[in-house]
Amino acid sequence: MKNKLSFTEAASVLMGMLIIMGFGVIKFGLSPQTPVMLVIGLLILWARIRHFSWEEVHAGIKDGMSTGLIPIFIFILIGSLIATWIAAGIIPTLMIWGFNLISVKFFVPSVFVVCAIIGLSIGSAFTLISTVGIALFGMGMTMGVNPALVAGAIISGAIFGDKMSPLSDSTNLAAAIGESDLFKHIKNMMWTTIPAFVVSLILYFILGSGSSEANMDKISQTISILSSHFSITAWAALPIILMFVCAWLKIPAIPTLFINIGVSLVMLFIQKPHTSLQSIAALIQSGFVSKTGNANVDMLLTRGGVSSMMGTVSLIILTLTLGGLLMNFNIIQVVMEPLVKRLNSSGKLITATIFAGIGVNLFVGEQYLSVILPGKAFKPAFDKSKLDNLALSRALEDGGTVINYLIPWGVAGAFAASTLGVPTLDYLPFVFFSLLSPVFSIISGWTGIGLKEEKA
C-alpha cells in the first residue's frame, strides 16, 4: 500500500517532533510558534520524501484548520470583551468587590473555589479566565501573592467547572465520543474529580497560607486608585448576570460574547457620553490602556483587544495545521493501533487511554483532538471489554480535556498564559487539579474503585 507507515517510523516522527518542541520551549525559552512552525516544515519535508503529494499535504492543512475556525473567532471576541470590561469598569469593580468579600487570609483557596463554582455555572474555562480570572489575578498581585500560584488556582478552578458543567463543549464532546449519557457521564466523573478537587484545595490552603501577610495599605491604595479612575457601580454585575443567563439558556459562545460586548459598550457610553467612535474602535482593536499613574495597576489593566489574541490565534493555526497533517498522514493512528491490541485488563486500558490523551496534547496541542483521537482509537477495545462506555468518556476527560492547559504550545495553555501574563511552565506546577485528575483516574482503573463495569 502506498505510503504505508511502520510503527517504528511513525513513533520516530512523533518523538522527533516532541524533542524539537520541548527543547525549543523549555530549554531555549522560545515562543511556541517557532518550534511548532519548524516541526511543520520538517514534517512536510518528510512527507514529500515519503512521496505524499502536495494535494495530500494541502488537504491535511485544510482539514486541521477547519476545526479551529469557531475557536479562533471566539478568541478574537474574548480579546474585545476583556478590553470593554475594563473600560466599562466591570473588572475593576469585580476586583474591589473581591477585596471586600474574599478572605485575605485564605485568598488562594478562595480563588480556587470561586472559579470552580462560576465555571460550573457557565461551562467555559476560557470565558472565566479572561473575565473573573483577570480580576482575581489583579487582586493576588496587589496582595503580593506568587503570580504563578494565583494563576494555577484560577486555572484549576476554571478547569473543574468546565469539566463538570453540562454546558461545557468539552464535556459534551467526551460524552458523545464515548457514547455515554451526558448526566451519567458527569456523575461518574465524580469518582476521580472530587478527590482531585479536595487534594487541590488542601494544597492551596498549605501554599496560600502566606497570603495572610498581604499589605493592607497597598490593597487600600489600589481600591482608592480603581475607585477614582473607573466607574465602580452595582451595574457592573449586569454583564456577569447576562453571561450566566446565556449559559443556562444554552446560547452559543459567539452570540453570548457579542451580547456582552454590546452591553459593556452601552455602559461605557452611559458613563462617558462623549466617547468617540474612533476611541471605541481603538479599544476593540488594541485593547485598554490604563493611565492611572500607578505602575502596578496600569500593568494589570493594560490588556485586551483583538491584537492581544493574535499570538494565541497564530498558535492555534499552527497546531491545528500540525494536527491535520498528522491525521492525514496516518501517523498517530499507526502509533495507537498496536497499543490497543495489548490492552487485556481494565487497568491497562484506562492507563493507555489517559496517556494517549496526554500524548495527543503534547504532539498536537489541541484540546478537542486529545478527546477525539484516543476516543476513536480505544472505543473498539472498550466495546470488547467489560467496561461501560462511561469508563471511556471519563478517561478521555481526565487525560485529554484537563491537560491542554499545561502544554506551552497547546491552545488552552497559550490562551491562559497570554491572558494572565504568566508563562505556562511557570503556572504548570500549581495547576493541581489538572495534574491530579489523571492520577486518580489511573488509580481507579487499577483498583476498580468507581470504575463502571456494567454495560449500559
Image (cartoon, grey):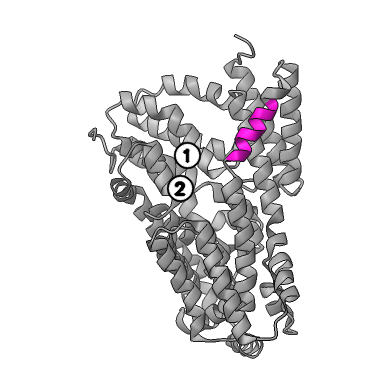
Specify start and end residues of the magenta stretch as a single range. Answer: 57-66
Residue that label 2 marks = 170
Q: Classify 141 as above or below 445.
A: below
The answer to whether residue 247 shows anywhere in this view is yes
What residue type is disc 2 on? Ser
Q: Classify 117 as above or below 96.
A: above
* Image side of residue 83 versus residue 38, left or right: left
Where is residue 5 shown, x and y percent of the image? 61, 16
Q: How would you classify the magenta stretch by its main secondary structure?
A: helix
Where is residue 10 shown, x and y percent of the image? 61, 22
Quadrant containing the N terminus is top right
Q: Residue at 60% x, 42% y: name it.
A: 365
Q: Do the residues labelled 2 and 1 touch (CB within 8 Å)?
A: yes
Cα distance, mark 2 to mark 1?
8 Å
Residue that label 1 marks = 371
In this orientation, which residue lies closer to the viewer: 346 or 256?
256
Q: Residue at 61% x, 18% y: name it.
A: 8
Q: Earlier in the sequence, mark 2 or mark 1?
A: 2
Q: Quadrant of residue 422?
A: bottom right
* Image side of residue 129 versus residue 34, left or right: left
- Looking at this view, name the residue that lies furthest to the top: 1
Q: In which quarter of the image is residue 92?
A: bottom right
Q: Circle 1 — which element?
A: helix
Q: Residue at 60% x, 13% y: name it.
A: 4
The answer to whether residue 155 shows anywhere in this view is no
Q: Classify 171 as above or below 60.
A: below
What residue type is disc 1 on? Val
